[in-house]
Amino acid sequence: MLLVASFLIVGYSNGYSQALDSPKPGGKPPVITNFYAPEQVGYGDYLKIYIAAKDPDGEMQRVAVSVSQLGWGDYPTDWTYLKSGDQKSFKGYFQWNTKSAKASILPDGTKINLKVSIFDKAGLESNEVVIPLRISSFGVSYPSPPAPFDQKDIGRLGYIHVDLVNPRKDTGSR
């Protein structure tokens, strides 16, 4: 026990507590400036979640997307690392295929919340946006996204890798 405690003290004093993403003094966190997703999505559709963000320090590194499903709970956070050209500012979308290998179908009206935030290289977190969605088992027509996402040059930032579960029918492990 004494040996373990000595190692922890030595390790701490040698700088093991300084992680790469510890905030630097005076740094400013990224800011999500705009976002959009339709309120309703058809189960199995490819959903586009639009995000615009900027970082005064030009150090945005990764995007965290957390999914919470009413009746099931929280899924593990999905991380996407940004391309080097997107570290100062970006405008684009994340694609999510809502069809899941873990759910043959989802009940009509299933409520989902997406929480999105961005972390920079210093570990500073942006504001968090919450995007409520409702799953429809019927066909859904999607409106064109509003400005600033209505331009033709909007690119895909990445994919959301979360497989939804039907808590009433399918058995799945968390």
Image (cartoon, grey):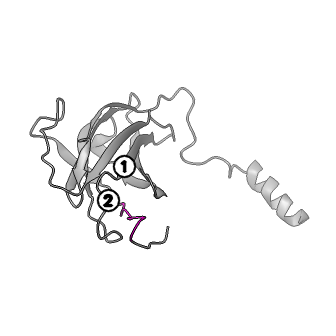
Left or right of 167: which side holds 123?
A: right
Q: Is residue 136 above or below residue 86?
A: below
| Residue 67 within the magenta-colored segment of the rendering | no
Q: In this view, does 168 lie above or below 118?
A: below
Q: Name the residue under label 1.
A: 111
Determine if residue 22 is in view: yes
* Whole-number angstrom distance, CA of label 2 to CA of label 1: 10 Å
User: Hey, what amino acid is under mark 1?
Assistant: Lys
Q: Give the range drawn in magenta.
A: 162-169
- Circle 2: is it few (<14), some (14-19), or many (20+) Cα within 10 Å? some
Left or right of 144: which side holds 124?
A: right
Closer to the camera in the image, 30 or 83: 30
User: Hey, what amino acid is under mark 2?
Assistant: Pro
Q: Where is residue 31 in the image (x, y as percent from the top left)?
A: 39, 30
Q: Residue at x 36, y 49 (%)?
A: 111
Q: Which mark is residue 107?
A: 2
Q: Position of residue 104 (x, y in %)?
A: 29, 71
Q: Is mark 1 on a helix, strand or loop?
A: strand
Q: Position of residue 41 (x, y in %)?
A: 23, 50
Determine if residue 83 is in view: no
Q: In this view, does 136 lie above or below 28?
A: below
| Location of residue 137 (image quadrant) | bottom left
What kind of secondary structure does the magenta stretch mostly adopt?
A: loop
